[in-house]
Amino acid sequence: MNSSTILKRLGLAGGWAQEVGLAAIALGLGFGIMPILIFFAGSSTLGRYDGASIARIYSTLYRGLGLGSLASWTVALGPYGLYLLFRALRLWWRASAHLA
């Protein structure tokens, strides 16, 4: 099952609807899943420190978003930024193939 079939089942078959759906998924990953991944990567690599918890990393992230912290915004918007970078590279690759 490819991604277009999954998106059609979700009702995201059109261009803008598909873009909004993928953006929502990427932002959901950034705001919901990335802090958990960062917590487990840090605790497995460096070990747990005193007071470390998933709730604390979420509170730190969202407090940083409110204060305008670049690190917090990078974590939250990182998956969407990677998605946009992938799209730009794919567009560039296709354009260079048409020129050759």
Image (cartoon, rainbow, N blue to C red):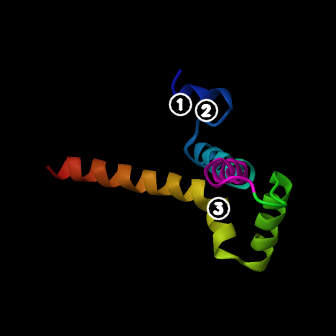
Residue type marked 1: Ser
Task: Find numbered disc 1 in the image and state the secondary structure of the residue it sits on.
Answer: helix
Disc number lying in front (1 or 3): 3
In the image, which is nearer the foreground, mark 3 or mark 2?
3
Where residue 83 appears, as percent x and y from the top left, is: 52, 52
Q: Position of residue 50 (x, y in %)?
A: 82, 61
Q: Of all residues shown, which one is farthest toward the left? A: 100
Q: Is residue 69 above or below residue 42?
A: below
Say which amino acid is labelled 3. Answer: Val
Q: As rendered, which of 82 and 93 lies closer to the eye?
A: 82
Q: Which residue is mark 3?
A: 75
The percent coordinates of residue 2 (x first, y second) are 51, 25
Q: Distance between the Cα atoms at labels 3 and 2?
A: 26 Å
Q: Are marks 1 and 3 in contact (CB under 8 Å)?
A: no
**Residue drawn at x 81%, y 52% as measured from the top left:** 54
Would you say the magenta stretch is mainly helix, strand or loop?
helix
Q: Amino acid at mark 2?
A: Leu
According to the picture, the residue beneath numbered tag 2 turns out to be 7
Looking at the image, do the residues carrying marks 2 and 1 touch, with CB atoms under 8 Å apart? yes
41 to 14, vertically: above or below: below
Residue placed under numbered mark 1 in the picture: 4
Q: Secondary structure at mark 3?
A: helix
Q: Quadrant of residue 65?
A: bottom right
**Picture coordinates of residue 62, whole percent (x, y):** 80, 66
Extent of the magenta region: 34-48
Query: Residue at image x 44%, y 51%?
Result: 86
Q: Earlier in the sequence, mark 1 or mark 3?
A: 1
User: Which of these two is toward me, 15 or 2?
Assistant: 2
